[in-house]
Image (cartoon, coloured by chain):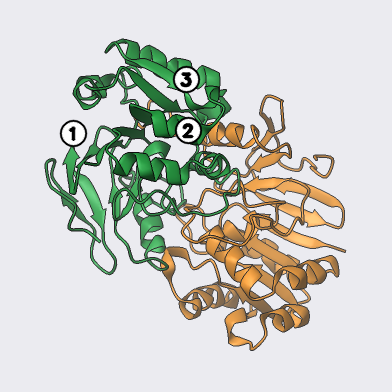
Chain colours: A green, B orange
Amino acid sequence: MKQLLIASTSTIHGSGYLDYLLDDLNVFFKNCQTILFIPYARPGGISHDAYTQKAQEAFQKINKNVIGIHEFESAADAINQAEGIFTGGGNTFVLLSQLYKNNCIEALKNAIHSGTPYLGTSAGSNICGLTINTTNDMPIVYPPSFKALAFVPFNINPHYLDPIPNTKHMGETRETRIKEFHAYNTFPVIGLREGSWLEVKGKTITLKGTLEARIFEYEKEPYEIKSDTTLQHLK
Amino acid sequence: MKQLLIASTSTIHGSGYLDYLLDDLNVFFKNCQTILFIPYARPGGISHDAYTQKAQEAFQKINKNVIGIHEFESAADAINQAEGIFTGGGNTFVLLSQLYKNNCIEALKNAIHSGTPYLGTSAGSNICGLTINTTNDMPIVYPPSFKALAFVPFNINPHYLDPIPNTKHMGETRETRIKEFHAYNTFPVIGLREGSWLEVKGKTITLKGTLEARIFEYEKEPYEIKSDTTLQHLK
């Protein structure tokens, strides 16, 4: 049975890395002693080692070990053998490029469909959608494709941000950007606010956390859904 | 002699489309009766016709005609024959994809290097850099390459935004994103604030408008430059 926890962000304002999720992660990874960490997204350009250490420090609080995928000779083998997987945030283009380069795409699909629990935050959540067409990240590298892992039948927009009232900045709002996406694509987009996550258990997809999420469907007005709403009907 | 006006934005807060630039555009396009408009970036997903009409209304104020590139059978021929060219903002990925698809890349390079005056705003400015790796736009379509027109020897980040003080949002600041860019690329990036533009005359590139711009060079601390600073030494 597929088991995923797809979070908008690793960190909410005023608390430490993964802190707000640790109670849930303790349950989610209950059968895992060691978590395979995928640090490819390199937030701020930090090294794989430094990023893995950050994940280790968080998971130590719930007595889990963390090992970086870059420490293995074969990334695909590391995924095949993992008890549980965590892909951290950073740059989605860098992350997806590395996943293609290191032959991780099929390995991740096989592992997750076989039931290996998967945690994603931010960029690590973006890649759980159909494509990375709705990432907020800067396209600092050119990946071989925008196609992602398709663990959910829609796209994700993490760090979803409501329009800022009275701003003088003329850049597009997030809603305008997703509207532009729907000029070229028809699948739904889930705007996940910081502090929200999707829980996937087999075929059931449920919004978790205290906040509402914003749903963008092709040729429909965007709308809000409450926590505990299920989403597997979207397509 | 190359002549470009590469603007951060089409519109500054509280004024109409292109209004803040019209006096300069009257001089810049003094030898042009008709401007070829490239509406491919389709802001908010609007049609080529609707977008071209918006540009027409602005240029009517300085007694110039505007014709949309989509009204020609051959986009490349339209560029070859143009007296002046304006590429409007919107989505940089959509814009660049259409330029490749319609064989406009070489045509634009030839025209601009032959002296056809070119105005770009936002996405239309992004493509004047070496690549579109530093666009702020959502990657709603997959272009055949991120390589752009290279009219200036660096990249442009339009709508440059300073970090917002006391924000609780955990998404990356613009400066963090450009820092990540420099983990994978070595060429400079010019953060152009809304209301600033670059004036290119032959080999000379000058910052214009009243604001400072922020310069990001590989392995250097970012720094500010004042209006009227020249930039052709950057590489």
Q: Is residue B45 above or below residue A55?
A: below
Q: Are marks 2 and 3 on the same chain?
A: yes
**Amino acid type of the residue that numbered disc 2 sits on in the rendered structure:** Asp
Q: Which SS class for mark 1? A: loop
Earlier in the chain: of badge 1 and badge 2, it is 2
For the residue carrying disc 3, how many other residues have a C-alpha within 10 Å: few (<14), some (14-19), or many (20+)?
Answer: many
Q: Residues within 10 Å of mark 2 (few under 14, many from 20)?
A: some
Q: Which mark is residue A52?
A: 3
Q: Chain of mark 1?
A: A
Residue B170 location (% of width, % of height): 38, 30
- Give the chain of mark 3: A
| C-alpha span from label 1 to label 2 | 33 Å
Please give the chain letter of the residue carrying mark 2: A
Q: Earlier in the sequence, mark 1 or mark 3?
A: 3
Question: Which residue, given by chain and number where applicable, does mark 2 sit on?
Answer: A77
| Residue closest to the eye, B203 or A34 | A34
Compared to residue B180, the image places residue B70 above or below, namely below
Quarter of the image for the C terminus of chain A: give it: bottom left
